[in-house]
Amino acid sequence: MRFPSPLVPARLIRRYKRFLADCRLGDGREITAHCANPGSMLGLAEPGMKVWLEPNDDPAKKLKYGWRLVDHENGHFTGVDTSVPNRALRLALEAGDVPGLQGYAGIRAEIRYGENSRIDFLLSGPGRRDAYVEVKSVTLCRAPGLAEFPDSVTARGAKHLRELAAMARSGNRAVMFFLVQRTDCQRFSLASDLDPDYAAAFETARRAGVEIMCQRTRITPDGVTLGPPLEIVI
DNA sequence: CCAACAGTTAGTTCGAAAGG
DNA sequence: CCTTTCGAACTAACTGTTGG
């Protein structure tokens, strides 16, 4: 997935009200960028961080920049846009590049299921079980090389796991797909200390037959693509 | 009177649904 | 068919309401 417009570097001044981030551009101008991540962004919204913004000249948009990346200034990046994982995974699914999820003729997004939820991807094909795939964007890293999810309490995430478990019990494939939007991690684990309820729901889902998948992304200011699988250590 | 709980709000995106 | 509209998603902080 390529960014539609070339990103520009900036420095984060502060993030506030979930969706807003004041930044200083290279020419010294201070602007407010849209933060496409309503999560806690633990460790990723520190004032002074180098960030990359996507400019736009869309008159319908109030904010002329969107925050896409954190640049750790050591060659590594973290993607903060929560809509990127779904787009990048869709491209990879269509290209047949996702191990374990290849050869499905039908790829549909945002299909209603469960109790008023939507599944990120419903994969189907002749002669095989439907596969319900839920994608989560992983950005938390507290120990070197170890990516973790979630980064705060997520009741919705736990609900998604229960609904995936229900699909697995009723004979479908159900996949929890963690997409790590960081280039500096090789292993993945659950942040059970941050949300014990989520960790419990995860174990229940796994015992019910929900498959766990986890892949890294390759990130540059040009775009984001899927990378290799991570070792899951739970 | 205060704590606990419920509802609301913020901006953008995506895809589904509805309308022409 | 294409265009427009609509709802859901994301979470924290705030306001308003309720109950002990």
Image: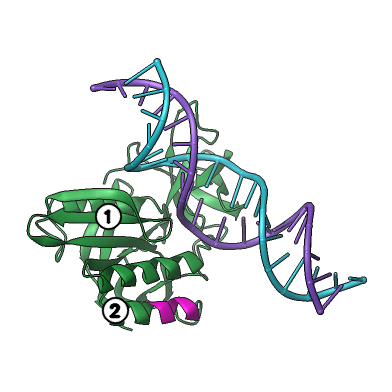
Chain colours: A green, B cyan, C purple
**Viewer-side label of 1, 2:** 2
Q: Dot 1 corresponds to which residue?
A: A121
Q: Is residue A95 visible?
A: yes
State yes or no: residue A125 in magenta.
no
Q: Which residues are magenta?
A: A196-201
Query: Which residue is more in the foreground, A220 or A96?
Result: A96
Q: What residue is drawn where x is 37% and y is 70%?
A: A161
Q: Is residue A215 above or below residue A204?
A: above
Q: Nearer the viewer, residue C9 or A172?
A: A172
Q: At x 50% / y 28%, what residue is drawn? A: A60
Image height of A4 relative to A197, above or below: above
Position of the C terminus of chain A by quadrant: bottom left
- Asked if residue A178 lies left or right of residue A56, the reply is left
Q: Answer whether residue A199 is magenta in the image.
A: yes
In the image, is residue A176 above or below residue A218? below
**Where is residue A143, by image quadrant?**
bottom left
From the image, give the main secondary structure of the stretch colored magenta: helix
Is tag 1's residue or tag 2's residue first in the polypeptide sequence? 1
Which three-letter amino acid code belongs to the residue tagged 1?
Phe
Specify the amino acid type for callout 2: Ala
Q: Is A170 displayed left or right of A116 in the figure?
A: left
Kindly indicate whether the residues beneath marks 1 and 2 are on one polypeptide chain: yes
Q: Chain of mark 1?
A: A
What kind of element bears circle 2? Answer: loop
**Residue, disc 2:** A208
